[in-house]
Amino acid sequence: MQSFWNKFKAGYLRFMQGRYGADQLGLAVIWTSLILNLAAAMCGNSAAASLLNLLSTAGWIWALWRLLSRNKQKRYAENQWFLARWATIKTPVMQAVARFKNRKKYVYFTCPQCHMKLRLPRGVGKVTVKCSKCGHSFEKKA
Ligand SMILES: [Zn+2]
């Protein structure tokens, strides 16, 4: 059994030699494909499900193709591009997740003047809010 695994490992390493392998973009594509797969399963037998399945399959193929690619420079550049984009979308995504988690504790709203995102604990009643960014004061019920 041990020798089988050793052979398998050696074969795998030989196969992967010179190939690009996994990176953050690859993982993100795999996760997206998995989510699309689940979403398709929830859509049942509809046109939307077929489309989601198609996108998911395309994602899997793309992820696998990148994994096995021998053009390391190009794949590396793609990953750098992805990481730069991800850095700019990560914060709003994380904030949205936090808002969703705390949706029972806080009322979320934006400042009417500067659109700064603000929050109030639920059940405080009608209070005067002072925006922490622009200092605009307005009444808000929570
Ligand atoms: Zn403001």
Image (cartoon, rainbow, N blue to C red):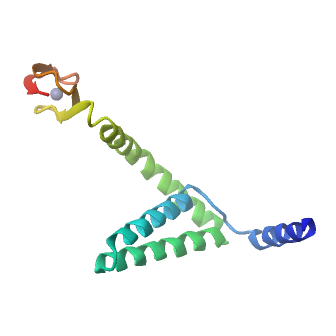
Residue at 63%, 61% (x, y): give it.
22
Residue 103 screen position, x and y as percent: 27, 37
Residue at 11%, 31% (x, y): give it.
113
Find residue 49 and report its image quarter. bottom left
Q: Is residue 115 above or below residue 10?
A: above
Q: Nearer the viewer, residue 64 or 80?
A: 64
Figure label count: 0
**Left-right relation of 14 to 85:** right
Q: Specify the quarter for ligand 1.
A: top left
The answer to whether one can see residue 117 in this image is no
Q: Is residue 126 above or below residue 54?
A: above
**Left-right relation of 63 to 140:** right
Residue 1 screen position, x and y as percent: 90, 68
Q: Is residue 137 above or below residue 73?
A: above
Residue 91 screen position, x and y as percent: 38, 41
Residue 67 screen position, x and y as percent: 63, 68
Residue at 43%, 63% (x, y): give it.
35
Find residue 127 and report its image quarter. top left
Q: Quadrant of the C terminus?
A: top left
Find residue 108 and report its image quarter. top left
**Left-right relation of 106 to 3:** left
Q: Nearer the viewer, residue 87 or 41?
A: 41
Residue at 65%, 65% (x, y): give it.
72
The answer to whether one can see residue 23 in this image is yes
